[in-house]
Image (cartoon, grey):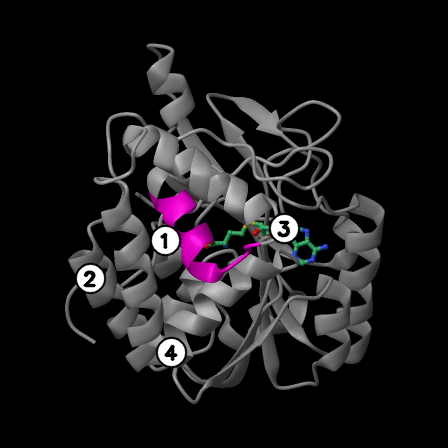
Amino acid sequence: MKGKTPHIVQYQGSKRKLASSILKYMPERFRRLAEPFSGMAAVSIASASEHRADSYIINDINEPLVKILEEAVNRPKQLSREYRTIWEEQFTHDGGSIQHFYHVRELFNSGGKSPANLLYLLARCVKGSVRYSREGRFNQSPDKRRHGTHPDTLEQNIHSVSCLLKGRAEFFALDYREILDMLRPGDLVYMDPPYQGVTGSRDNRYLSGVNFAELAEALETLNRRGIDYLISYDGSCGGKEYGESLPESLGCTKILLNAGLSSQATLLGRKSETFEALYISRSLNSLTGAVPRQLTFMEIPA
Ligand SMILES: C[S@@+](CC[C@H](N)C(=O)[O-])C[C@H]1O[C@@H](n2cnc3c(N)ncnc32)[C@H](O)[C@@H]1O
């Protein structure tokens, strides 16, 4: 596919910029790609745009989020139409566009969990940075300087994503381990769980966190079942490490991808490069021969 890879809406932690680097460590062609922590599914979309897999499993525990993708792929016109209506209402809302955002947020939190409502909230908040309260209520504020993606642009993007994945993707809103249980040898898994340890004790960035020991056990099980995987896990920024490394006993090869300048550090007036770790399962690395078989650090310009 020529031109830019489409994406639906900004989402924190999105792998949009790194997707093409990650794809370099996957086989040229494979049967099925599973993304159990899909977010906005940047890697599946990039893979589909290169015709790498025959089919896709897209899953995120956040059901309204996965519904955005499902609607975009299977009912693109309807989702675009609903988004346009909500987006246009902000200009006629009695309290102005900021109050309109809070109105849609309240609708969403009180049961109107329509994909179009969440799509608008994501498009309208700073960098798609969703925030959730302990009770699971969406509690992020709007970006006061922007009105959110224009409906014409969004419609075009939704249409492109639909063309890439329609008839090829299955959607689920389950815990990642239930997805892993469905897989068989020949499938490829790309995992992007929430980082551990970046924020304080409770991670309010996503609806749910992931326990380190359980994740390591799930990867061990994939090794035993002969299922290949790649996983983005810990990261580092300006020499500071975030999160724990995955156990060496898994036998993965770890590489570091250069994710560019940290926006957080730039805001604070520092220039720090961010590196994101990508682990490649042992059998996948033997298959593609992408990286020599020891723990290797490699930088890829962003
Ligand atoms: C770093 S984001 C993924 C971003 C994604 N790679 C993209 O390009 O947009 C992590 C995602 O994992 C999801 N998540 C958290 N716990 C989960 C679980 N136990 N099972 C499945 N998904 C989970 C979150 O809702 C969040 O969307």
Task: Give the label, 4 or 3, closer to the camera.
Answer: 4
| Residue 120 drawn in magenta | yes
- Residue 16: assigned label: 1
Residue 50 visible here: no
Tell me residue 273's x, y (percent).
38, 28
Cα gap from disc 2 to disc 3, whole angstroms: 25 Å
- Residue 193: assigned label: 3
Taking the spot 62% from the left edge, 65% from the top edge, the residue there is: 36
Could you tell me what secondary structure mostly forms the magenta stretch? helix
Q: Amino acid at mark 1?
A: Arg
Write down the region rendered in magenta.
112-123
- Residue 75: assigned label: 4
Residue for badge 2: 4
Is tag 4's residue or tag 2's residue first in the polypeptide sequence? 2
Q: Amino acid at mark 2?
A: Lys
Residue 114 drawn above or below residue 248? below
Cα gap from disc 4 to disc 3, whole angstroms: 28 Å
Q: Going by the image, does 62 lie left or right of 219?
A: left
Cα gap from disc 1 to disc 4, whole angstroms: 23 Å
What is the tally of numbered marks visible in this picture?
4
